[in-house]
Image: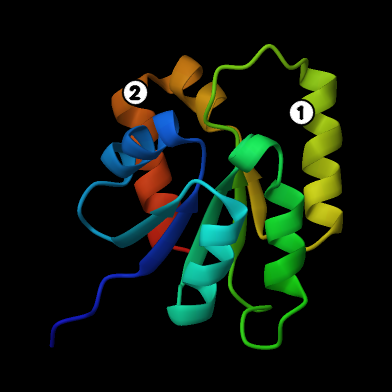
Amino acid sequence: MDMKPKTILIAEEPHMISALRLALGDAFDITDSTSFADAAYQIEIKHFDAILCGLHFDEGRMFDLLNLVKTQEGTKDIPFVCINALNTALSDAVIRVVEVAANATGTHSFIEFSKWRKELGDEAACAKLREYVADLP
């Protein structure tokens, strides 16, 4: 029996879309979006099994997208994963504050993908991300 691949929305800065697509490989049905308006439209017209939203999505609109997803009856149960994929100049303290806020407002998790890449190397970090997304409920 063929299983359909999980449908994933990647909401992220344009230059990170291809990196995340490459990291996830071809095991998923991926739709990407670089703006809040487009992500909202994609969520309206298509079912997603998970949403990966970058910390810097559309000039910081990650929480706006999270709020949209978690306040709609048809989408509130979709796992929403916040991901920091960029090597940013943000301090660990700022990242922790964002992580706490994201978890308090309904995210499934907060992934420090840039940190994984530094600690594990690109190949192992990509494998870890693929496994993580595949195991989402």
Q: Mark 1 falls on what kind of element?
A: helix
**Placement of the N terminus among the 4 image quadrants:** bottom left
The kind of residue on which mark 2 rests is Asp
Q: Is residue 137 visible?
A: no
Please give left or right for residue 94 compared with residue 79 in the image: right
Q: Position of residue 76 (x, y in %)?
A: 68, 78
Marking on residue 40: none
Which residue is outermost to the left? Answer: 1
Determine which residue is flagged by label 2: 122
* Residue sitting at x 37%, y 19%: 121
Please give left or right for residue 58 compared with residue 45 in the image: right
* Few, some or many residues within 10 Å of mark 1 (<14, 14–19, 20+): some
Q: Mark 2 falls on what kind of element?
A: helix
* Few, some or many residues within 10 Å of mark 2 (<14, 14–19, 20+): some
Please give left or right for residue 81 compared with residue 129 in the image: right
The kind of residue on which mark 1 rests is Ile
Q: Nearer the viewer, residue 23 or 135?
A: 23
Foreground mark, 1 or 2, reads 1
Q: Position of residue 14 (x, y in %)?
A: 44, 35
* Residue sitting at x 77%, y 64%: 67
118 versus 33 height, above or below: above
Marking on residue 95: 1
